[in-house]
Image (cartoon, rainbow, N blue to C red):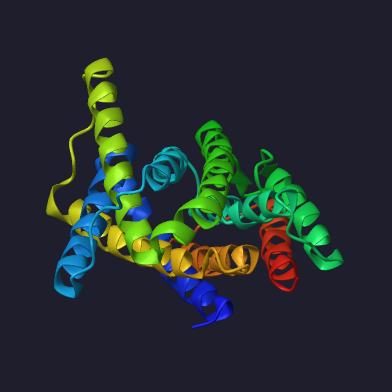
């Protein structure tokens, strides 16, 4: 499959995964929801690797170094995104997080990949969109809360970390081990890093909200499986000279997630934020047309 097909498949998987991540995060807490989702994804990948006879771990020390670097970035980005979902509106944080493709594209450009005029305009549009959707709103019938604004800032951090993580995957990890094994290594490493972070967090905060039963695990499980599939198809498309195409088309998931939030969750946005959401979608398309 080509980069365009893989990118669109990633967008579809990410869109539903992000939508399901919000109820999981609000019922379980950001860190536990992220840990549960990664656990389901890692288990599914392990079954696939065993059935296909694919090796579990590389023997190349350089590949492990790239894997640890990418895992650290992906863990930080994933935890920040779940935190943003627990605080903010899905229709706002999804477009911000979706700008991770612009971060990957910018890093690819800095590493020597040529970018066209439309891509440059798209990058500027993403920056403007992030600013618009994260502005506090106070209009008739709608007012941004401090938690929603904080959620937007967490989403900005998530986009930066995930964009850098995907660049590392495509630049250094996937060319050495392939997309399937790269995804498995990332899931194992991020699962371990999230577990350590969760343990430290639990020791510092004894009043953590208990998980809301098996219903929360259902949301986290499906979100983890879908997000793992999205990372897998993205990894399969990276390292082939189409890094920016695959990641930016994958970030088109913001359209699906935003539509689901507006139609099902009945979320409301202010006029300026509506402008930011539209600009984020348009900018993503422009970058994908490079």
**Farthest residue toward the right?**
117
Give the residue displayed 32% in from the left and 60% down from the top: 181
Residue 119 lies in quadrant: bottom right
Residue 172, x across and y down, in percent: 51, 51
Q: Is residue 143 depicted above or below 167 in this figure?
A: above
Residue 3, x across and y down, in percent: 56, 76
- Is any atom of residue 75 visible in this view? no
Give the residue displayed 69% in from the left and 40% down from the top: 135
Q: Is residue 251 depicted above or below 173 in this figure?
A: below
- Is any atom of residue 205 visible in this view? yes
**Farthest residue toward the top?**
204
Q: Quadrant of the C terminus?
A: bottom right
Tell me: 157 left or right of 197.
Answer: right
Tell me: 55 left or right of 103.
Answer: left
Give the residue displayed 67% in from the left and 42% down from the top: 137
Give the number of callouts. Answer: 0
Residue 139, x across and y down, in percent: 69, 45
Q: Is residue 109 depicted above or below 26 in this figure?
A: below
Foreground of the two, 66 or 43: 66
Residue 43, x across and y down, in percent: 18, 58
């Amino acid at each position: 499959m080509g980069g365009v097909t893989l990118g669109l498949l990633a967008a579809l998987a990410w869109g539903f995964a992000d939508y399901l991540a919000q109820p999981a995060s609000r019922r379980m807490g950001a860190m536990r929801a992220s840990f549960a989702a990664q656990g389901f994804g890692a288990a599914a990948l392990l079954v696939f690797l065993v059935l296909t006879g694919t090796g579990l771990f590389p023997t190349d020390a350089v590949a492990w170094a790239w894997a640890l670097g990418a895992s650290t970035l992906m863990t930080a980005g994933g935890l920040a995104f779940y935190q943003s979902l627990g605080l903010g509106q899905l229709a706002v944080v999804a477009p911000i997080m979706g700008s991770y493709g612009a971060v990957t594209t910018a890093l690819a450009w800095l590493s020597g990949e040529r970018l066209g005029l439309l891509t440059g305009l798209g990058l500027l549009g993403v920056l403007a969109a992030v600013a618009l959707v994260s502005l506090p709103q106070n209009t008739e019938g709608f007012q941004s809360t401090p938690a929603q604004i904080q959620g937007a800032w967490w989403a900005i951090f998530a986009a930066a970390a995930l964009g850098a993580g995907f660049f590392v995957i495509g630049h250094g990890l996937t060319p050495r081990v392939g997309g399937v094994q790269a995804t498995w290594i990332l899931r194992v490493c991020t699962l371990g890093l999230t577990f350590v972070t969760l343990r430290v967090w639990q020791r510092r905060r004894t009043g953590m909200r208990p998980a809301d039963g098996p219903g929360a695990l259902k949301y986290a499980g499906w979100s983890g499986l879908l997000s793992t599939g999205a990372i897998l198809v993205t990894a399969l498309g990276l390292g082939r000279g189409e890094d920016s195409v695959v990641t930016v088309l994958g970030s088109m998931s913001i359209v699906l997630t935003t539509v689901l939030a507006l139609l099902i969750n009945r979320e409301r946005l202010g006029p300026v934020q509506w402008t930011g959401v539209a600009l984020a979608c348009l900018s993503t398309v422009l970058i994908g047309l490079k």
